[in-house]
Image (cartoon, rainbow, N blue to C red):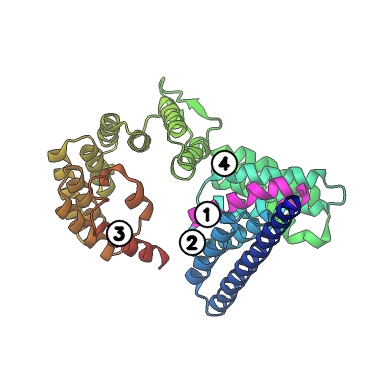
Amino acid sequence: MKKISYYLCLFLLSALTAFGQKKSDAKITQTIATYEARISEALSASEHYEMLDNYKKIIKLYEKHDLNKLKLAAYYTQAGQVAYTLKEYKKALKYQQKALAIQEKKLATTDLVVPYRNMVKTCIALKLYLKAVKYQEQIIQVLKDEPDIEHADLAMAYGEIAAIYEASRKYQLALGYYEDATIILHGNEQYKKEFAYYQESVDFLKKKLEERPQGYASTDPTSSKVVYDEGAVVSELSVAFSILHLEKNYAEALSRFTELNEELETGKNWESIGLCHYYLGNYPEAIEAYQTSIALSPELMQENYHNNIGVAYAKNGQFDKAKIAFEMYQSLLSDDYWHHRNWGLWYALQNKTYEAIQALKIAVESGFDDVEWLENDSSLDSIRNDEDFEYLLRIARENLKK
């Protein structure tokens, strides 16, 4: 009898769990349907920020409850398209990368051409030419391996990668791909316009290459000085900037910019090295790099320089020097809310809670929306338990949705 009671309880518990799960699933499905309806309404009214906000909510539900991965990838893609329309290209790329990470595991290679093309378009918008080339090469490989492919599709892919190389001034590589495209399309009446365009590009680039030195570097015949071809380093700079600002792999970015400086030292490279050191918490090295950047390129001593070195000084405990930098930044951009953020950081690092909160209130009420910084930056550790700190977060979150 006891055994029967035990198994009966087990059955009832299982049934209740299944019922609860079904109820929970139904509620999630209903919530998603509500968000999708809002997206449709926003689309009709061309309210793209409203669309993006609802896509974020759906994505959050899919991630939290580990729902269908391919559907999640589709929502990432749609959110990326909206972000691209809003010209928020970094955000678009982030969504597209998340979608692609799923799609590459779940889809056949022939179904990846469209996601790769989305990546190419966004990378070009961000001037991340080497990344764009990487995805375009993957498109070409897919098309080459597809037995039923139209040859014209491959020609177009060659033309697209040629255009990327041309934009990044790698003219010799661009020429080769344009020539491949013309070979495929030669005599094809359906693609006469495309053939004419590619042939025109071939002629233009041949002339261009005759007018300039080739190779990564060449020697000036009148001196021993090495002359660098600016176009040859564009893609390498693009990768380094991508690693720094998008991937946020600061150690790798630091290595890249240091190598670039060994080939051609510039103030801009040193500025980026300073940023890498800052994010790695190497504040003395960051300060030294920023100072080197303006020694090489005085024109870089603008608003961002004073902001960047001021924050590094503050984080390094050099508050007098940080104050001078922040005052200079404020004098140059008096209407910008960012200098209020800087003063909030400056006061918080000195445990001046009231002054820090007041400065940050002005910042968020003026539009500051970096919620991640408010939540995570160690500079604010001394004020996070203040009763007004939640207000700062709430206003910043509201700003982020606008």
Amino acid on which disc 2 is placed: Lys
Q: Quadrant of residue 318?
A: top left
Label 3: few (<14), some (14–19) or many (≥20) C-alpha neighbours in 10 Å: few
Name the residue rendered at 35%, 50% in the picture: 375
- Residue 125's label in the rendered image is 1
The correct choice, above or below, for 54 with respect to 250 in the image is: below
Name the residue rendered at 54%, 44% in the picture: 168
Closer to the N terminus: mark 1 or mark 3? 1
Label 1: few (<14), some (14–19) or many (≥20) C-alpha neighbours in 10 Å: some
Please state the horizontal and vertical placement of residue 247, each as a whole percent of the image: 49, 42
Label 2: few (<14), some (14–19) or many (≥20) C-alpha neighbours in 10 Å: some
Please state the horizontal and vertical placement of residue 56, each as a whole percent of the image: 52, 62
| Magenta residues, start to end | 89-112
Closer to the N terminus: mark 4 or mark 2? 2
Please say whether residue 336 is visible from this viewpoint: no
Please state the horizontal and vertical placement of residue 274, each as a whole percent of the image: 33, 35
Amino acid on which disc 3 is placed: Glu
- Residue 390's label in the rendered image is 3
Q: Mark 1 or mark 3, which is nearer to you?
A: 3
Q: Mark 2 or mark 1, which is nearer to you?
A: 2
- Judge from the rendering whether residue 41 lies leftward or rightward of residue 224; answer left or right: right
Q: State yes or no: discs 2 and 1 in contact (Cβ < 8 Å).
A: yes
Which residue ends up furthest to the front in the rendered image?
Answer: 1
Q: Secondary structure at mark 3?
A: helix
Residue under label 4, please give it: 130
Q: Mark 3 or mark 2, which is nearer to you?
A: 3
Q: State yes or no: discs 3 and 4 in contact (Cβ < 8 Å).
A: no
Residue under label 2, please give it: 87
CA gap, disc 2 to disc 1? 9 Å
Q: Which residue is nearer to you in this view: 368 or 211? A: 368
